[in-house]
Image (cartoon, helix red, strand yellow):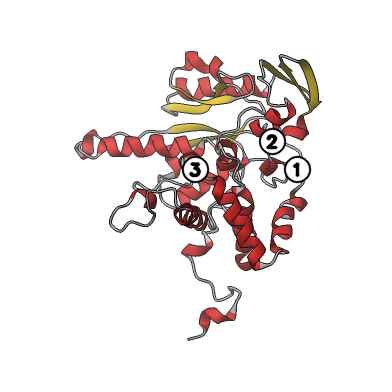
Amino acid sequence: MSIEKRLQEKAVELLSEKKVDVVVGYEAGTLPYQAAPCFIENPDDEGRLVLNPFCSVNLAKYVHDILMAHKASQKRMKPEQRTKKVVGVVARGCTTRSLVIHLQERQYERDQIFIIGVPCRGYVSKKKLAAAAGGKEITACAIINDRLSFTTPDGTKEIPLESVLAESCLSCRYNNPVISDVMVGDPAPPMKPDSEYADVDAFEAMSGEERWNYFAEEMKKCIRCYACRNTCPSCYCKVCFVEQSQPRWVGVSVDESDTQAFQIMRLFHMAGRCVDCGSCVDVCPMGVDLRKFLKKLDKDGYNLFAHRAGEKMEQQPPLSVHSMDDKDEFIYEP
């Protein structure tokens, strides 16, 4: 039985037995190379669920939004009338890490989610696939074993699947769930985690001026559409700092310094919280190299505090705890 069929059967079971109120998963999108988030509430709709390398979105974002919306709807109700909503979610490795962060930050309780763990062998980068197609419209797309076949007006072409996988997937060390209530499918083979910080190492080898110039040039691409913020499962402030007026942190302008301030503040907001799911890079319409800066923070978090975001429930984020074993003795100086 295919993993997709087993996933559909599990969804039917959970919904029929009222163990969950909704299953958040993926369904076929309107484009042949893209899957879309779906929300299954009726067991008869289980056939909509798919699982393939076109499933790119980190679904933890939707779990959080559903539970927060339900919590808000309960505020004006009498305590005895309030209900608990349970969300089932199809979760690969990076999704489960985001869920761990939500739980650590007390966004909801563990019994409010049912985690259907699935193995992941990487998802297709739309930007890489577009480049492979020479910018031509892709009218059909299929995956056969380790090959990807796509059709454009120029004809059909077949390429290695690995050549179009997202960069975050190629060096992923968590392509299997770190936490789950049930596991569907056999564990995925390891990727190439030894190359996880290759880009960061090259970036660190630059001088301070070169690093700043690289950052400044990348930020010139940013149009502040906030797609990176809107898709990030760790961005859930009720009012984002960019929309605050008292005080106003960032101006509403096209000034380069405002764009830089937005990105710097958001990047540092992700310190100890970014799971390298690649969602922000995937949705950026301008191709800003956000991952390099996020991975730099991730590397520092590991080297300084032996911490990897969302790896373990019992391991708290580095900026929320204090340890006498932390590196850099200057911390204790007057």
**Residue 146 in view of the camera:** no
Where is 113 relative to 48, above or below? below
Q: Which mark is residue 223?
A: 3
Q: Amino acid at mark 1?
A: Met
- N-term mark: 3 or 2: 2
Front: mark 1 or 3: 3
Residue neighbourhood size for the residue with mark 3, other residues' Cα within 10 Å, grouped as few (<14), some (14–19), many (≥20): some
| Label pair 2/1, CB-CB below 8 angstroms | yes
Front: mark 3 or 2: 3
Instruction: Find numbered disc 1 in the image and state the secondary structure of the residue it sits on.
Output: loop
Q: Which residue is mark 2?
A: 122
Q: Residue, x 48% and y 66% (percent of image)?
A: 321
The spot of residue 324 in percent (x, y) is: 55, 76
Residue neighbourhood size for the residue with mark 1, other residues' Cα within 10 Å, grouped as few (<14), some (14–19), many (≥20): some
Instruction: Find numbered disc 3 in the image and state the secondary structure of the residue it sits on.
Output: loop
Residue neighbourhood size for the residue with mark 2, other residues' Cα within 10 Å, grouped as few (<14), some (14–19), many (≥20): many
| Label pair 1/3, CB-CB below 8 angstroms | no
Question: Which of the two residues, 129 or 233, is positioned nearer the viewer here?
Answer: 129
Instruction: Find numbered disc 2 in the image and state the secondary structure of the residue it sits on.
Output: loop
Where is 117 relative to 263, above or below? above
Q: Residue, x 49% and y 53% (percent of image)?
A: 256
Query: CA gap, disc 3 to disc 2?
Result: 28 Å
Q: Amino acid at mark 3?
A: Ile
- N-term mark: 1 or 3: 1
Query: CA gap, disc 2 to disc 1?
Result: 9 Å
Q: Amino acid at mark 2?
A: Gly
Q: Which residue is mark 1?
A: 191
Give the position of the N terminus as an image quadrant: top right
Q: Residue, x 44% and y 54% (percent of image)?
A: 258
Q: Quadrant of residue 130?
A: top right
Question: Which of the two residues, 268 or 259, is positioned nearer the viewer here?
Answer: 259
Q: Residue at the front extreme? A: 255
